[in-house]
Image (cartoon, rainbow, N blue to C red):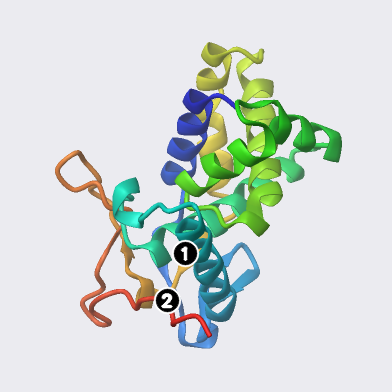
Amino acid sequence: MKSTRVRVILAVAAAGVALTACSPSQAGAAAIVGKDRISAGELDKNVREYEAALAKANVSASQLQFPGSVPQVVLFQLATSAQRAKVAESKGITVTEAEVDQVISSGEGGAAGYEQQMLQQAVAPSKTREFTRASLLITKLMAKYGGGTDEAAIQKGQAQVIKDLQSVPITWNPRYGTINEQRSEQQPNLFVESARFGAVPAAPPQQ
């Protein structure tokens, strides 16, 4: 997948998130995507796996200049990936395992190179296929709306996809911050600290 297309997908995901916080009945959830729950435990597991993969690749999170802490960006990717898949599938879009395989293997450096690209997107290795599948699904939906598969058509379909994403709201636990509604070059972070909860918790140490 071209980096420009990845940026388009991430921009759409950022535009389509719901600006809500968790209710008390959702305690223990890091986020709710539609009606599906991403538990704090699942997030912690992904953060630990992701940080271990970074260490193995001899890369630090600070080098990647993420718009937030590692738990925040990993959570954002988990939630928006699930959101994109739900929306695209509800519109009849499908992706085969062969298509996922092709994306993973066709880039520079093959599957290993692609995994490194995913690390740059805050995606843990075990979530590579899931993230790729969601990206393909939403790309196909954008192409359907835009009338083609070139970059111009993909971008043309963004507006309708952003509207569609609102049908599957993401509810964020304020423990991990509040969505930054005023993102800009000066304030690029995806989340801002919640006044109630303070700083975003770090991932628990690996055993």
Residue 40 visible within the image: yes
Q: Are marks 1 and 2 in contact (CB under 8 Å)?
A: yes
Circle 2 residue: 203
Which one is closest to the eye, mark 1 or mark 2? 1
- Looking at the rendered structure, the kind of residue marked 2 is Ala
Q: Which SS class for mark 2?
A: loop
Neighbourhood count class around disc 1 (C-alpha, 10 Å): few under 14, some 14–19, many 20 upward? many
Of the pair 144 and 203, the residue shown nearer to us: 203
Q: Is residue 155 above or below residue 115?
A: above
Of the pair 27 and 53, the residue shown nearer to us: 53
Residue at 76%, 37% in the rendered image: 100
Q: Quadrant of the N terminus?
A: top right
Residue 194: percent from the left, percent from the top? 26, 73
Residue at 58%, 41% in the rendered image: 164
Of the pair 141 and 193, the residue shown nearer to us: 193
Disc on res. 51? 1
- Looking at the rendered structure, the kind of residue marked 1 is Glu
Residue 87 visible within the image: no
Residue 53: percent from the left, percent from the top? 53, 59
Give the image quarter of residue 79.
bottom right
Horizontal arrangement in the rendering, residue 174 relative to residue 153 (left or right):
left
Q: Earlier in the sequence, mark 1 or mark 2?
A: 1
Residue at 59%, 54% in the rendered image: 168
Q: Is residue 91 above or below residue 197?
A: above
Residue 146: percent from the left, percent from the top? 60, 17
Neighbourhood count class around disc 2 (C-alpha, 10 Å): few under 14, some 14–19, many 20 upward? some
Residue 89: percent from the left, percent from the top? 75, 44
Give the image quarter of residue 107.
top right
